[in-house]
């Protein structure tokens, strides 16, 4: 099942709650409704099923239903990124983590162009 962030709000106890619209096949949505039980909610305007969590999983992602019937986000891509960053460590690990975070959170990997510094002209050097 796919999820897409629709909004967030502060609960009565001050926690931020993230609200995701759920989409999938009819079979998946029926399984989702069954797993959610009395906590199953739908969007009043679109009728799309909603999933609520206090842990943001990015702009979009996937849900899975465990063998125990719990609805949880598929965090395997996050786990893989963390593992790679930890394996390499240092500057390379930091860069891997940064790029993975941008991709996982919907920003996409961005390359940064660095312009080379201009060589000083002879007349500029004489002023020093």
Image: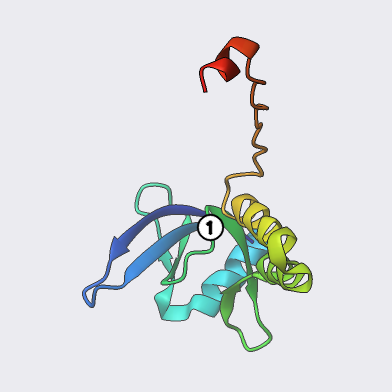
- Residue reaching furthest top? 123
> Residue 83's image quarter?
bottom right
Find residue 109 and report its horizontal and vertical position in percent.
66, 44
- Please tell me whether residue 122 is drawn above or below residue 78 in the rendered image: above
Q: Give whichever of 7, 102 is nearer the camera.
A: 102
Q: Residues within 10 Å of mark 1 (few under 14, many from 20)?
A: some
Q: Residue furthest bottom?
A: 68
Residue in front for this viewpoint, 98 or 31: 98
Relative horizontal placement of residue 12, taking residue 87 as reference (left or right): left
Would residue 120 appear left or right of 18 to someone viewing this image? right
Please state the horizontal and vertical placement of residue 47, each as a whole percent of the image. 43, 53
Residue 39 shows up from this direction: yes
- Asked if residue 58 is positioned above or below residue 12 in the image, the reply reads above
The residue lying at 48 percent from left, 60 percent from top is: 49
Q: Is residue 13 left or right of residue 95?
A: left
Residue depicted at 61% across the width and 57% down the height: 101
Total marks placed: 1
User: In which quadrant of the rendered view does residue 97 lie?
Assistant: bottom right
The x and y percentages for residue 39 are 41, 76
1, 48: nearer the viewer: 1
Q: Which residue is mark 1?
A: 58
Q: Is residue 89 left or right of residue 44?
A: right
Q: Is residue 24 visible?
A: no
Is residue 87 placed above or below 3 in the rendered structure?
below
- Please identify the quadrant where the N terminus is shown: bottom right
Residue 70: x, y in percent?
Answer: 57, 82
Q: Which residue is painted at 66% across and 52% down in the image? A: 99
């Amino acid at each position: 099942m796919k999820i897409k962030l629709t909004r967030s709000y502060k609960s009565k106890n001050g926690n931020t709650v993230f609200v995701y619209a759920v989409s999938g096949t009819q079979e998946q949505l029926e399984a989702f409704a069954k797993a959610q039980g009395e906590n199953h909610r739908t969007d009043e305007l679109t009728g799309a099923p909603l999933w609520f969590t206090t842990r943001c999983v990015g702009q979009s992602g996937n849900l899975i239903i465990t063998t125990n019937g719990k609805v949880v986000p598929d965090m395997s891509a996050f786990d893989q990124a963390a593992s790679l960053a930890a394996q390499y460590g240092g500057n390379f690990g930091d860069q891997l983590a940064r790029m993975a975070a941008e991709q996982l959170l919907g920003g996409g990997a961005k390359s940064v162009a660095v312009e080379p510094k201009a060589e000083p002209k002879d007349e500029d050097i004489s002023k020093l």
